[in-house]
Amino acid sequence: MRVVLDTNVLVSGLLSAVGPPARIVQALLQRRIIPIMSAATFAELETVVRRPKLQPAFARAGVNPENFLTSVHAQAQFVDPIPTQLPIRDEDDRPFLDVMATPPKPQYFVTGDRGFEFSHYSGVPVISAAEFAHLLTRR
C-alpha cells in the first residue's frame, strides 16, 4: 500500500510503542506499506527527528533516530512533486499536498494535523492514524 505519512504520525509512532502511530511505524519497518515522499517531506522528517529536545525521549523509547531515517529512506518511493495551488491553512504543509498530486497517486494521506481541512486532496483520502491502523489490521 502506497501512502503519504505526515511527520507527526511517524514521530508519534517512534515516541510511543503503543497506539495507532506505533502500529503504522511498525508496518512501515516491516515493509507492509510504502511511504511516498519528496526530498522536502523527507527533509522535514530529518529535521524533526534530529531535534535535540526529542533525543532524550527517543532514548527512553529505545529508538535510534539515525537508524530509523536510514530505514525510511531505503524503503520510501521518492517522487518529484507536482506543485499545486490547492488551498491550505499552513503553507509549511504544502509539500505534502504536492506529493499527493503526483502520479501515481498514493492511496492515502495519514495525518494527525487538523490543518488539512478537506477529506481529500487531489483525489487522495486524508485519514487519521487510527483509521489507517484499522485498515492495516484488516489486511
Image (cartoon, grey):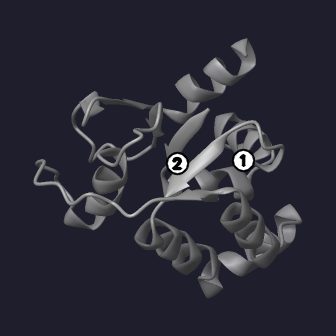
Task: Using the image, determine if residue 36 lies above or below residue 80.
Answer: above
Give the mark nearest the N terminus, 1 or 2. Answer: 2
Q: Residue at x 24, y 37 (%)?
A: 122
Task: Classify mark 1: helix, strand or loop.
Answer: helix
Label 2: state its secondary structure: strand
What amino acid is labelled 2 in the image? Leu
Q: Residues within 10 Å of mark 2 (few under 14, many from 20)?
A: many
Relative to 50, residue 99 above or below: above
Q: Name the residue carrying label 2.
A: 5
- The image shows residue 67 at horizontal and vertical percentages of 82, 72
In the image: residue 114, left or right of residue 63: left
Residue 7 at what x, y percent from top left? 51, 58
Question: Pointer 1: what residue?
Answer: 25
User: Could you tell me which residue is drawn at 29 percent across and 46 percent down?
Assistant: 101
Q: Quadrant of residue 79?
A: bottom left
Relative to 94, 69 lies left or right: right
Q: Quadrant of the N terminus?
A: top right
Q: In the current view of this chain or complex, which residue is farthest to the top?
A: 138
